[in-house]
Amino acid sequence: MTIPAPTGVHPAWLPPEAFQPIGSRRALVSGEGLLVDTVHDEVARACARYGGGVRRAAPGGARGLPARGDHAGGPFDLVLALRAAGPLPAVAEQVDARFRGRRGRADDAIGDEGFVIARRDGVTVVLADEPAGLLYGLFHVVRLGEPAFGAARPVEHHRPAMRRRMLDHWDNVDVHPKSGQVERGYAGGSIFWRDGAPRGDLPRVRSYGRLLAACGVNAVAVNNVNVHVTEAHLLTDRLGDVAAIAAELRPYGIRTHLAVDFAAPIVLGGSPTGDPCDARVRKWWAEATERVYETIPDFGGYVVKADSEGRPGPFAYGRSHADGANVLAEALAPFGGVVHWRAFVYDHRQDWRDRSTDRARAAHDHFAPLEGLFRDNVILQVKHGPIDFQAREPVSPVIAAMPSTRLAVELQVTQEYTGQQRHVCYLAPMWSEVLGFRPFGPAGPAVARIVAGAAPGGERGTRGGRAPDEGGGLVGVSNVGDDAYWTGHPLAQANLYAFGRLAWAPWTDPAAILDEWIDLTFAPVAHGDREPLRRALHAIMDDSWRTYERYTAPLGVGFMVRPEHHYGPDVDGYEYTSWGTYHFADRDGVGVDRTRATGTGFAGQYPPHWSAVYESLDRCPNELLLFFHHVPYEHVLHSGSTVIQHIYDTHFAGVEQVAEARSLWEGLAGSVPAALHARVRELFDEQLRCAKEWRDQVNAYFFRKSGVPDARGRRIP
Amino acid sequence: MTIPAPTGVHPAWLPPEAFQPIGSRRALVSGEGLLVDTVHDEVARACARYGGGVRRAAPGGARGLPARGDHAGGPFDLVLALRAAGPLPAVAEQVDARFRGRRGRADDAIGDEGFVIARRDGVTVVLADEPAGLLYGLFHVVRLGEPAFGAARPVEHHRPAMRRRMLDHWDNVDVHPKSGQVERGYAGGSIFWRDGAPRGDLPRVRSYGRLLAACGVNAVAVNNVNVHVTEAHLLTDRLGDVAAIAAELRPYGIRTHLAVDFAAPIVLGGSPTGDPCDARVRKWWAEATERVYETIPDFGGYVVKADSEGRPGPFAYGRSHADGANVLAEALAPFGGVVHWRAFVYDHRQDWRDRSTDRARAAHDHFAPLEGLFRDNVILQVKHGPIDFQAREPVSPVIAAMPSTRLAVELQVTQEYTGQQRHVCYLAPMWSEVLGFRPFGPAGPAVARIVAGAAPGGERGTRGGRAPDEGGGLVGVSNVGDDAYWTGHPLAQANLYAFGRLAWAPWTDPAAILDEWIDLTFAPVAHGDREPLRRALHAIMDDSWRTYERYTAPLGVGFMVRPEHHYGPDVDGYEYTSWGTYHFADRDGVGVDRTRATGTGFAGQYPPHWSAVYESLDRCPNELLLFFHHVPYEHVLHSGSTVIQHIYDTHFAGVEQVAEARSLWEGLAGSVPAALHARVRELFDEQLRCAKEWRDQVNAYFFRKSGVPDARGRRIP
């Protein structure tokens, strides 16, 4: 296998130097399979560069091989072995025995994607049951860096918290007249498609798969959920284009998924109907799916956006979304595929005059009644908040409402509403809050556990006999394009990295993930010099999401962005539209009353603990105040500040923080590659300009409305 | 010559039936020249249809021909003759003698485009000095209809008030990614271009020329003033495409103009500079222009948008707009061509926080200092208002500021800001107000006289020895596309017709023009049945501009439209942008202070009379109050109503008027062709929906800001 190294493309978190600790040592790779080959090839390339050596054990031939632990000066510093591969070096046998001893005989599996790692007797040992686990183990060693070969390490067992860790690409094959090559893409074109055809740079695709494997992602949907006509054909006559991508991603343990048009039987099959309960439709899906698996045997499944923002769906036939999802699930089931069925269904032709309709309620209203009706291989894919990827939203109440439904939480790695990869906005802290949120209250399980397959209330799901840890997983909308830095803003690479890491290990501290990312990405910077860089990047990035929140829409009210492209401020931009995203500011106050008592009742969609908290003006967290309540400008927050003064203060503060971050970045000239430094510096200029625009527009808007002057006498234009 | 009758295209104001009075009679056409051929062919076709006859007099062969006036039962009911064609029928000689007698010997010219018409002894006589005059005379007879052949008519002399009556097409050759095939086009694609090439339907182009001649237009610019790369080449290697259009328009007396890229020497000529004072640039323009005239000998000239909204211009070289215009004028002068140089120059990257900058001032600030510096064949093309074709603006102060500069007033026939041909908005009353406005006060000349060539103060221009009636003329941005009704909304045809008629005869009552248009367009409706139709159309259209004004931006404040596409309301849509179009509404009041005393000083750009009127809060006309003043919501208007109550009242009234108009139209089912009726009915549904949206957004916006309830207790959402 060729390990990709596209020229002119930034290596992101896998620069050659990150492999130096491995590449300068002697390694044994033991086991068979495509992904073990990948492990071997990765190690071999590192060794070729840094003077180490690698040996591939023949099946059954590893036993008795001398390793450093056995004999001083022995040949191996690193053993990467499948346990099933046969006899292991003695030190590896010891590690395995210790692992089995800890686990007890009944449950000594390492797991499909898991690995065991230890260091003893001078040998670092990685064991796995499956090739994927070995690959993840290898990248774990890469992440550890030189310390992987330092002091002894006890046996650690690593397994992903989520079985499904997927990135959705909103990439169009054709350049769409409105949404372009990549819908909500801020990093150039698509890495998969260009102008109606495959982009043709398969090494770049493989390189992408490699980056994803190194952070833990194991599934990619290769086209936009808004499936236009050309893209619909990927399911049938253009399936070869998908297979070509799948072939590049497969060596890195990534399964390929496809977004499909619910009306495909009509659009592609000439069917007179797309009714999911029509036998012809069921047959069409079954046959089409069979052909997919003939071509791509490890195909992951379908992603569907139905009855949403103009897409076709089951409503046209008087059918439910369970009917709609199940017909696809039925077709996929024989092959082990899944349907990711998006819960993003709402009325986008709402009358802004009608304050009783509330878009926030829509997903729960539509889907909670369907609890129990979905097939086992349907995953209901729920945006993390009830609206649409705003910088601040409450967690979607759907997540607590469907205990026997497999749920995936969808995060938006692409920064549609968080600065569009022109602003630094490290999103891991937000995602971490979402994943750690306990929808049933402090005693209940966190979101991460629910989507991993643990049922609400702490009990594991048992429905339908599926394995308890199946769950739905975590899905991110990719922020990657054909840009040389992958993500437009070089620092936005950290979001992609953090997405994968949080999907694997949701409890990881975002700051620790950032450390990993810094150490890998800037591995070419000598270790001693890296500390100032690390400190500066933490100062720039750790709080950047909250900084972004400060200078944009206040107190959870959301939106206030320019319509359509969603970049930059327009306080009333969506106020009198059909999109259901309002702030209701008038001369007296602002915010959306979503209480049960006097509002839309959305607060009542949560289980009792949070329902009571959100319902209460006193107990509602500041940051969500205007999401749940309409309050006077002089309403006093928990902080002691009034709403209006809070708006002024945070907007001034946000801009100052951007200016400080920019200044810190200036100080890194010489510490990072010049071209990368220059690009980020330019982007900081734009971020600062835009932050000031947000500050001034939001402050001016609320000053004009409220007439309340800034208590600190600053200039409001 | 083939007289065009494109299939499937509505005949607009030239249905065959409009020619029945001519076509059922015996006519003589006398004279030579392309346009006399056109006259003959038009009459011949009418006669072929309706049983009359036409005779073409051979040169010198008309004398002594018997006409009805000479001998009862004689052969001619209608004589259309060039005086220079030689001996005329006796009755025509008598008409000419009477005309000459009235005029006195020193000034007996009919004029280049003029004609004399009379009816005596049962013969209708049209005389002209030039073929164009005969053509306009023919269409005058068409307009008169049957009464042209009724009672005797005294000698009338008709000449256009404006020498130059031009339509600018904002048509792109390529479909532009943002502006499409036609920028601000609401009637389908271009009649000239499609997808990068000529559209190829030359009969349609000729048919267009015919319609224009019939309302008096004599010049067409065939491409968008925003000249993109493909369109730049029309000047050189794609000149043949322009020549093909010119060949179709020529038989109807229409000269073809071209919008050019000021940077053409660079873009097309490979010049290192576009500096208008650079000898190489002058040479390039001279040579390019010479080649244009080799191909199109009657080419009209260039239209230029320079240093405006991102277009290149002389500023880049530290040169003035006079320098820029003059280099093109110098190239055109040997051939009698003109430059239409647009005065639409302003800072479109304005800081909305900066209230001292005023876009309204820009044209005057830029151009008034250049008075006296333009060459004779430069026409400064000034938008009628200081901002941008709003439904209500004051007349541009530039018109009074440049007495020795040839000025053209630019009107927007395409309804960018007046309903985009989805709303009925008959614009002639607005244009009539503009043309009748007296910038120097009641004793001074009207705009129509100034642009016709009469200098401010009532004296005719004398500079540079040019003929006193040269002037600049009237320019309209065309509302025509490849739509079957030409203009999208069938009733928008009336705007195109009225534009031509007002350019010819600015003092005509808009209601009378509408009558002409109705009688021609609905000629197929029998005369007796036409009265109810005429009454209904007057009720629908006469006041439709003021109705539109009522339900949109109030009291002259302008904009409040959705950004970019400019359709429908968005009160704050441009409020915090760089475009210089603000209303400054806050909780206390609204409007732009443009006074000298406390505002931007724009009011001071007018001569004393209007400067004083606009400066004064008491004297400023209601309809322009918020254009010139920022006032509290409780400010009392001349009507006795407060500003806020006026906003509520007019917005409720505007919607009611649309509903009434729609109801009147419903009543016309059966009176007009069914397809036309259906299209207008559909458009009325949209107009009513949109008018309600305007009403509710504007009212809600100002209610939320002001807190003042509607005095009549109506529901404000």
Image (spheres, coloured by chain):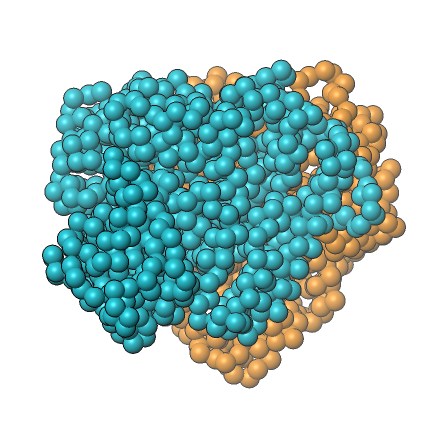
Chain colours: A orange, B cyan
**Is there any visible trace of residue B717 in the rendered image?**
yes
Q: Splitting the image into 4 quarters, where does residue B650 fall?
A: top right
Number of numbered discs visible in the structure rendering: 0
Instruction: State the image coordinates of residue A594 (x, y, percent, origin top left).
Output: 79, 48
The residue drawn where x is 56% and y is 38% is B392
Given the current orientation, which residue lies at the most extreme front position?
Answer: B71
Foreground residue, A644 or A205? A644
Q: Is residue A688 above or below residue B477?
A: above
Q: Splitting the image into 4 quarters, where does residue B383 fall?
A: top left
Foreground residue, B568 or B669? B669
Instruction: State the image coordinates of residue A482 (x, y, percent, origin top left).
Output: 38, 44
Left or right position of A257 against A556: left
Q: Splitting the image into 4 quarters, where does residue B42 fall?
A: bottom left
Instruction: State the image coordinates of residue A210 (x, y, percent, origin top left).
Output: 42, 47
Instruction: State the image coordinates of residue A390 (x, y, percent, origin top left).
Output: 63, 43
Foreground residue, A211 or A613? A613
The residue drawn where x is 29% and y is 52% is B95
Q: Quadrant of the C terminus of chain A?
A: top right
The residue drawn where x is 85% and y is 52% is A596
Left or right position of B208 against A270: left
Q: Is residue B82 above or below residue A661?
A: below
The residue drawn where x is 60% and y is 50% is B543
